[in-house]
Image (cartoon, rainbow, N blue to C red):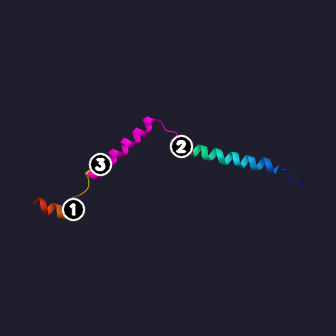
Amino acid sequence: MSATVINLRQARKQKARDTKAQSAAENRRKFGRTKAEKSQEEAEATLETKRFEGHKLTSISSRKDED
């Protein structure tokens, strides 16, 4: 029937440390990339956009102008 005694001050501080560590992990994932990784991702996005734009159909009005 004896309950575990919890020091509320220590529990509060531990919770704050855990929250801070979680936000630090998110920031590392978001901002912790090398310049090469950033440029590689940008190049892939550009290539994907070019491929997508290349597969677009021209509008009907512009086709009539060509004939």
Q: Quadrant of residue 67?
A: bottom left
Q: Is residue 59 above or below residue 12?
A: below
**C-alpha gap between disc 1 and disc 3:** 18 Å
Q: In the rendered structure, which amino acid carries the disc numbered 2?
A: Arg
Q: Say what secondary structure mark 2 lies in.
A: helix
- In terms of sequence position, does the residue under pointer 2 or pointer 1 come before the other? 2
Q: Is residue 23 above or below residue 58?
A: above
- In terms of sequence position, does the residue under pointer 1 or pointer 3 come before the other? 3
Dividing the image into 4 quarters, which one contains the N terminus? bottom right
Question: Mark 3 highlights which residue?
Answer: 51
Taken as a whole, is the magenta stretch helix, strand or loop? helix
User: Which stretch appears magenta?
Assistant: 27-53
Residue 42 image position (x, y, % from top left):
39, 43
Numbered tag placed on residue 29 in the rendering: 2
Residue in the image at 80% along x and 49% along y: 9
Q: In the rendered structure, which amino acid carries the disc numbered 1?
A: Ser
Residue 10 image position (x, y, % from top left):
79, 47
Question: Mark 1 highlights which residue?
Answer: 59
Tell me: 48 left or right of 34.
Answer: left
Q: Is residue 58 magenta?
A: no
Q: Say what secondary structure mark 1 lies in.
A: loop
- In terms of sequence position, does the residue under pointer 2 or pointer 3 come before the other? 2
Q: In the rendered structure, which amino acid carries the disc numbered 3?
A: Arg
